[in-house]
Image (cartoon, grey):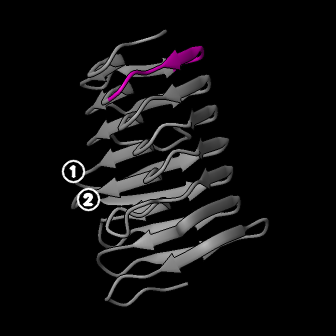
Amino acid sequence: ISINNNSAALYGKNNAGVLNSGTIFTGKDSVAIYANLTNDILNYGIINLGENSKGIFSKDGTYTNDINTGKILSTSNSATGIYSEYNAGGSTLIRNSNEITLFGLNSIGIYVIGTGIQNIENTGIINISDSNDINDPSMGIYNENVANTLVNSGKISGSDYAIKFNNGSNVLELRDGTEINGKIQGSTEDNTV
């Protein structure tokens, strides 16, 4: 699937399942997989992102399994591999078990935001390149939420930040197999490693 600028390749909502097993190429300002209020989403294909585009965009999705077992790739600037906004009750799981490699400037591997609890897990590889703007750094995993837990047993490389927590009291758990290349920054509140 190849899509133009300002488009979405796959769209699901209201508990619909969304699955990509093929190859998606996005244009600028686009989304490969857009999910709104879903509980089953999975990329096990290949996603190639254009500038300022997102591989997986999830809003208030409640997940308990992998959402990326494939590859999310880009050489364009300002790409985001997985973007999750969660404001619902309970919690959701954002898990990458394969590869997110973004070699454009100012990119983010996994970005979570919202008021709900999002538990992030990486057992795969996240490779993020440089930034040319101190106010818009590149990051492997960026957490804007409060009270999240990030569990890593994979590899995270970020030229500016490997992991950054921006709000709240969060937990970072580094398990066997962990390899971190880049800075880890906690929020101004209590964080636990």
Instruction: Check the image and report above or below for 14 versus 77.
Output: above
Instruction: Check the image and report above or below for 107 versus 133.
Output: above
Instruction: Check the image and report above or below for 44 versus 169.
Output: above
* Earlier-in-chain disc, 2 versus 1: 1
The residue shown at (43%, 60%) is: 132
Quarter-of-image position of residue 11: top left
Magenta segment range? 20-28
Q: Is residue 26 magenta?
A: yes
Circles 2, 1 touching at the beta carbon (< 8 Å):
yes
Q: CA distance from mark 2 to mark 1?
A: 5 Å
Q: Which mark is residue 9?
A: none
Quarter-of-image position of residue 156: bottom right
Q: Locate residue 6, reporting x and y percent.
A: 26, 22
Give the amino acid at mark 2: Gly
The residue shown at (65%, 45%) is: 97
Return the residue found at the far front.
132
Q: Locate residue 160, reporting x and y percent.
A: 51, 68
Viewer-nearest residue: 59 or 184: 184
Residue 154 appears left or right of 4:
right
- The crowding category of the residue bearing disc 1, from other C-alpha atoms within 10 Å (few below 14, some 14 to 19, many at least 20), is some
The residue shown at (65%, 73%) is: 174
The residue shown at (61%, 26%) is: 44
Q: Locate residue 51, reporting x and y percent.
A: 40, 34
Residue bearing the label numbered 2? 116
Viewer-nearest residue: 137 or 91: 137
Residue 157 appears left or right of 115:
right
Give the amino acid at mark 1: Ala
Residue bearing the label numbered 1? 88
Q: Locate residue 128, reporting x and y percent.
A: 57, 54
Total numbered circles: 2
